[in-house]
Amino acid sequence: MITENEFAILKAIDDSEYGDSLRDSVWIFSVSNRCGLEGKVISGTVASLVKKGYVQVSEYHYTGKDSKTIVMTYAGIQAYIEMANGDTKKYA
């Protein structure tokens, strides 16, 4: 079962300007800018999605900055497509 906040995060991954497929990693700042959630609600919701096995988060270090990406797992893609009634911007 996906909560409203979890769906907002998954939809923001789909809406991100990064990646062409739901299987592509996107920058987490892009998701944060699109999900309509704020601060600790975002981090808590992402943690819940990780725990459920719906997303994976990776950390990258470059030019002295830390940046994270997020990607939907196969289970996350399936749950998102079902909850979105098949209406996605990116291909699965």
Image (cartoon, rainbow, N blue to C red):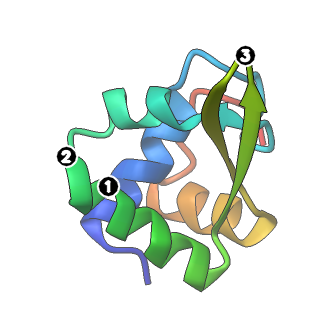
Q: Please name the amino acid that badge 2 sits on.
A: Glu
Q: Residues within 10 Å of mark 1 (few under 14, many from 20)?
A: some
- The nearer-to-camera label among 3 and 2 is 3
Q: Answer yes or no: do the residues labelled 1 and 2 have beta carbons within 8 Å?
A: yes
Callout 1: helix, strand or loop? Answer: helix
Q: Is residue 4 left or right of residue 51?
A: left
Callout 3: helix, strand or loop? Answer: loop
Which is more toward the observer, 51 or 23? Answer: 51
Q: Distance between the residues labelled 3 and 1?
A: 25 Å
Circle 1 residue = 42
Q: How far apart are marks 3 and 2 (CA)?
A: 26 Å
Whichever of labels 3 and 2 marks the residue nearer the N terminus, that label is: 2
Q: Please name the amino acid that badge 3 sits on.
A: Thr
Tell me the residue at 46%/30% (across/down): 29
Circle 3 residue = 63
Tell me the residue at 39%/58% (across/down): 7
Residue 87, image x, y percentages: 52, 40
Residue 34, image x, y percentages: 34, 29
Figure check: 83 above or below 39? below
- The nearer-to-camera label among 3 and 1 is 3
Whichever of labels 3 and 1 marks the residue nearer the N terminus, that label is: 1
Circle 2 residue = 38
- The quarter in which the C terminus is drawn is top right
The quadrant holding residue 41 is bottom left
Q: Which mark is residue 24?
A: none
Callout 2: helix, strand or loop? Answer: loop
Figure check: 80 above or below 2? above
The quadrant holding residue 52 is bottom right
Q: Please name the amino acid that badge 1 sits on.
A: Ile
Q: In this view, does 73 lie to the left or right of 16?
A: right
